[in-house]
Image (tube, coloured by chain):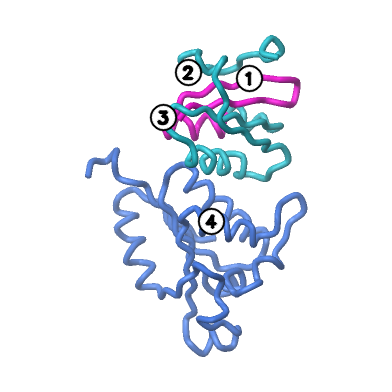
Chain colours: A blue, B cyan
């Protein structure tokens, strides 16, 4: 595939449930697919609160829709949203199971993330930590 | 109606001025990047040759973001100024 034909990739690591970080992460994800790029949003640590069923609807900011709209729109538009917990115990402590992840969100560990992010980075993609 | 619209950017073969609009949506009040995001979504539902019109109250969307998306996706477009804070963008698929 030529340089021009290759789809650009944006891989975002979201580690926070703070609206000041979560909103820009989703705004960037929606913007990336709007510009025709492939995008992944990898949620870990407090970022996991966003992908727990009902969690994103509690994250709000004046002047913008609640974050659950961004999450649903991102998934519908093809943004790959994944959830990573450093350990099973941590996920249990956070009350996160396969059954209470938002629809369309998959579990992924850091190796899975890097497996896609490393070649993307080599090919000029963006890997961001928010 | 056309008489009241001022052409600000024309990256089309002029026929967008008198084009038959297949779809339109109002993006006024939408948060970033929804005007551009919804534009792509709407365009994805159209057939080749169809024209979409977007109404916006954001100069950033009208003059920069949506034109950038169109150029990125190689869509012909036209930006019209309706009044001081209202723009219409027509895009041909």
How crowded pointer 2 is (Cα within 10 Å; few <14, some 14-19, many 20+) is rated as some
Q: Secondary structure at mark 4?
A: helix
* Precedes in sequence: disc 3 or disc 1: 3
Q: What's the residue at 58%, 42% (across, down)?
A: B38
Instruction: State left or right for residue B55 relative to residue B92.
Output: right
Residue A51 x, y percent position in the rendering: 57, 70
Asked if badges 3 and 1 are on one and the same chain, I answer: yes
How far is the residue under mark 1 from the one under mark 4? 29 Å
Is A74 inside the magenta-drawn segment? no
* Precedes in sequence: disc 2 or disc 1: 2
How far is the residue under mark 2 from the one under mark 1? 12 Å
Q: Secondary structure at mark 2?
A: loop
Q: Which residue is mark 3?
A: B74
How crowded pointer 1 is (Cα within 10 Å; few <14, some 14-19, many 20+) is rated as many
Q: What's the residue at 34%, 48% (across, down)?
A: A124
The image quadrant where one finds the C terminus of chain B is top left
Residue A88 x, y percent position in the rendering: 48, 87
State which region is magenta: B64-93
Q: What's the residue at 48%, 31% (across, down)?
A: B70
**Chain containing mark 4:** A
Residue B74 x, y percent position in the rendering: 41, 29
Figure quadrant of residue A90? bottom right
Q: Which residue is mark 2?
A: B12
Asked if badges 2 and 3 are on one and the same chain, I answer: yes
Figure quadrant of residue B17? top right
Q: Which mark is residue A74?
A: 4
Q: Identify which residue, A21 or A29, lies in the foreground.
A: A29
Q: Which residue is mark 1?
A: B80
Q: Which mark is residue B61?
A: none
How far is the residue under mark 3 from the one under mark 4? 23 Å
């Amino acid at each position: 595939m030529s340089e021009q034909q290759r789809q650009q990739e944006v891989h975002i690591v979201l580690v926070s449930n703070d609206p000041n970080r979560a909103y820009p992460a989703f705004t960037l994800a929606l913007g990336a697919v709007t510009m025709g790029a492939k995008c992944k949003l990898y949620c870990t640590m407090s970022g996991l609160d966003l992908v727990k069923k009902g969690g994103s609807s509690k994250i709000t900011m004046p002047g913008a829709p609640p974050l659950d709209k961004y999450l649903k729109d991102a998934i519908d538009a093809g943004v790959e949203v994944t959830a990573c917990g450093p350990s099973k115990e941590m996920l249990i402590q956070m009350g996160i199971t396969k059954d209470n992840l938002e629809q369309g969100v998959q579990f992924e560990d850091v190796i899975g993330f890097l497996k896609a992010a490393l070649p993307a980075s080599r090919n000029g993609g963006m890997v961001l930590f928010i | 109606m056309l008489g009241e619209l001022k052409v600000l950017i024309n990256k089309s073969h002029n026929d967008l001025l008198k084009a038959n609009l297949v779809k339109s949506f109002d993006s006024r009040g939408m948060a970033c990047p929804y005007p551009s995001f919804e534009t792509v979504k709407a365009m994805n539902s159209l057939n080749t040759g169809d024209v979409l019109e977007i109404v916006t109250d954001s100069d950033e969307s009208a003059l920069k973001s949506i034109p950038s998306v169109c150029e990125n996706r190689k869509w012909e477009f036209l930006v019209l100024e309706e009044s001081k804070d209202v723009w219409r963008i027509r895009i041909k698929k």
